Image: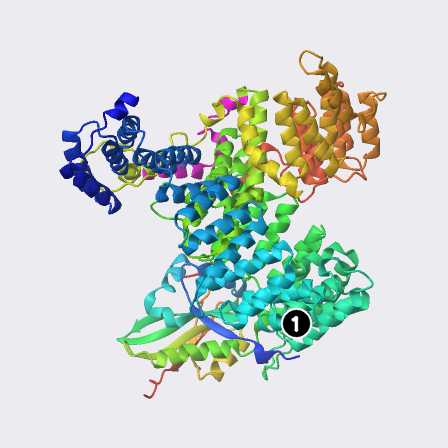
Amino acid sequence: MSKAQAEQPVLANKEAKLFRELLSHYEEKHLTKGRKTADQILKKHPNHGETLAMKGLILVHLGQREEGKKMVKQGAMLNMKSHIPWHVQALIHKGEKDYDGALRAYKNGLKADKDNINILRDACFLLTHLRKYDELVEYRHRFLQLRPVNRTHWIGLAVAHHLNGNLAEAKNILEWYDKFLKSTPDYDADNSERLLYHVRVLEELGENTEALAFLDKYAQSRYIVHRTSTMEYRARLTTKLKSSDAPDAWRVLIEQNSDCWDYYKGFLSVESIDYDSITDENRAAALKHLNNFSQQYPRATAPRRMALSVATGDDFTNLATAYLSSNIQKGVPSLFVDVKPLYTDPAKAQSIQSIVEKLLEAHNTPPAPPPAENGSASAEPTARLWALYFLAQHHSHLGAYSTALELLDAAMAHTPTLPELYMARARVLKRVGDPYGAARVMNEARLLDGQDRYLNTKCGKYRLRAGLVSEAGEVFGMFTKKDAVSPGADLEEMQSLLYLREEGDAHYRAGRLSQALKKYYAVSNVFDQVENDQYDFHPYSLRRTLLNVYVNTLKWEDSVRSHPAYRHAAVSAARIWVSVYDDPKLAEGPAASDSATSGSDSVKKAKSKAAKKAAQTPAATEKNGTANAQQQNTNEDKGLEPPQAKDEDPEGARLIREERPLERAQKLLAPLWADVARGVWDVETCAVAYDVAVRRERYLEAARALARARSIDAEHPEVHVRTVELKLKVQSLSAPAVSETALAALVESLATALPDELSLETFNSQYLQRHAADGGAVLGAARAARVLQAPLAEVEETVFSALQDGVALKIETALAALAFLRSIESSRADEFRAACDARFELATVFKAPEELERLRKESLGEPVEVKEETLE
Amino acid sequence: MSTSTNSRVSFASLTPNNLGTVRKLNSVLFPIRYSDKYYQDILRPEVEEFCQLIYYNDIPVGNICCKLEDKDGEQCLYLMTMGILAPYRSRTLGSQSLQRILDAAASHTKPKITRIYLHVQVSNETAKRFYERHGFKETGVHENYYKRIEPKNAWILERTIEPASK
């Protein structure tokens, strides 16, 4: 190698000039010119490493990725002492989102040229992106030493210290910078942001006095220009310091925005009232303040609504009467959603019901008023409508579905043109287990206002819930791009998590595991993109001095995968991988074009339509594809990111056959571990984490996941079943397979939940006795009995006991029980289905298959008018 | 109760997107099913001003729909449907709507509209009185206008349109 290095030609004047030209051609993105120049140099010095690297980079831009990358590598081998080939490699890696690879290349580049500013800068961004904060501090330091006069380098170092958790050092750097700063103009936004950031660091350090003094000094001298932020910092800091200025500081903010809950909470906190946990001691005081604010700001909703959360008894009734009647009079559609959080207190729910019932009576005008010639209209008819709507939602929320439906009937007889009524009815039907009726009614709502995208989305979603996948696509397609391959493809590009999740679930319910998996991975890809997208903020935020939001954004990105959509997709996909591991035949699955998609004709029609559409637009797909990568004559810049390859596996048939399903599941679940620290971790996630770990023979990991689930809900059926399972497993394990210490730890982890002297059968029957009135637990006991290889008849009998009077059985549990019976090939499955059908009167999910098919078709129909007379 | 002070009446032109609301209204307002041609005609651009949805506090509560007819070289409006949902009647919504159509007709110049007419089932005295209050006169009875509902006859009510003075 050193031989090759020694042979690196020194460019003569002419070529050196050409090389400088080559660099500037690249900078200005004159790619063809750059390539020509590179060729000129290479003619004379075919082994010039730097030129080869630059030519390779240009070729990548021109779409000749593989050839270009080879050339860059060659260049690096020829000249390891130059930073240029490494820099070029890093750029290409970064374009391919291989951030670790890019960082390695940058580090090699710095070995060649340790003070290269450009590489240092880019490396800093990468280190931030990869959250390697201790190294970041080191690099920032070096950067600042090299260019101490640049403002952003100081701030960059302070931010690095901050991110690395060293607030004191961040403060030091900011103070140093402050000292040598000569003069700044008034009203300089960048400087203002820097000063606010300084205050933030001081506040986070707990140096509140210093922070307040700093804030006041620079706010008065007009260096800090952001008024709202200044006032918010002031209010917060004076409160922390228990200063007498605090109440006024909050009052000023409330004056500015009297509908911001945080300001009222801040005001109350001055008097040591924690709005989120009001006690009987401070209830009256809190209420007094909120009432005063309500009087002071008659148009503000916040203090009125907050008072409802605080008040109890008669106070509550009086305040709620005023609040509800004025909002019903006004016709605020979201009123129920607004007050729903109050329902955690059953007394308040009851009180709200009687208030609105009284309002309804007051507005009880007969359906057809006497034809009063004088037109003396009394009560607002719309108030009656909104009261009915409110009460319907109220009863639906409390589970009184028939009452809710009756109220909606009355409301629709009053005014049949309000889409909200149809949406509410659809939601009730969904809750009673009639997804087909729900989809039909949601479509009626959509037909009332075709340009309302919210209704359109809801209708599509409800169709997916009813298993009508391509029919949902038809509805979504009314709002998606017309030139998209399919509505779904467009929605995926727009990162519609709702769509991806619901379609994934629809496939999952129908047993099309590969297609479900495909959608769940699409959700995960959206989060990959969100993480990648933050890269651009590293250079941008520092350059524009947007420090406070930048630091917040990084923190948010750290926990972005705790989003419910990711969790749901990861957990569901992991479940699929587990079942494919248990039964590889599932991966073969029903063929994608299986009639199971939902046998209706419209599906086939839509499919062939989509196929035709896809056939019509090959030109468009080719443009984005790799097809013309080989074409030399196209000289446009294709950027450093590889083009999106055409999806060769749209239905996931190949994906689901991938090897190592458990490792794939583990990879999806891994980001969720971070949530444990935040305490957001549910039984379902723990359960699937256990399932994956136990199959990977990571028994301690499995035991830990189970213990975590137990700490959330020790009696949860999913916990119970797995406890039995793990105990059996442990009994079968012996020393060579698992170490003695591990085995001991396992035994210990189970000991508290399941004492050794207890047989598993007794353990299970005790559990069943404890929870005989809880359908979910009954099913759990039946599943555990199955694990314990109890006779089929006994397992069946346990499942059927969930149908007894007095057992709380939810529809989802009954569906799960039915699926369980089918999975163990019970001959009584259909008997159970029929029994559920009788029990859940309004539900349709328990109908026989042919009946379901009919219902599904009906749910697509539009309302039919039955009238004798027809007029042209 | 401070009611009519803050109630809002507004109108909207018909589009393919709100046609579902018109259908829903017609299905509860009239004992008649209207043909697809009716729904195509009311969307024509030339009748936009004469086919309107009526809103009360932002909720669609009625509609008024006319078509243009050429009679012996004269342009006249035929009022096909007009109705308000029961709970919203006696609030002058109908009068406001009809007046809006009459005003639009009066200021229509290309072509000039000379009169407006309509049919009322002979059992519907209330409707007849309503139109008479707005200057309509009975000009005859259309025998067996309706085929399947009783009574089958309909009054023909008509009024002339005076061009708006500029």
Left or right: A451 as drawn, with respect to A82: right
- Pointer 1 chain: A
Crowding at dot 1, Cα within 10 Å, few <14 / some 14-19 / many 20+, comes out as: few
Q: Main secondary structure of the magenta part?
A: helix
- Residue A319 seen: yes
In the image as oriented, which residue stretches furthest toward the right? A757
Q: How many marks?
A: 1
Q: In which quarter of the image is residue A735?
A: top right
Question: Is residue A542 part of the magenta span, yes or no?
Answer: no
A446 versus A855 height, above or below: below
Q: What element carries label 1?
A: helix
Question: Magenta residues, as a range?
Answer: A586-613
Q: Where is residue A397 in the image (x, y as percent from the top left)?
A: 69, 53
- Residue A799 seen: no
Question: On the image, numbered disc 1 is attached to which residue?
Answer: A326
Q: Position of residue B13 (x, y in %)?
A: 41, 68
Q: Quadrant of residue A37?
A: top left
* Residue type, mark 1 in image: Ser
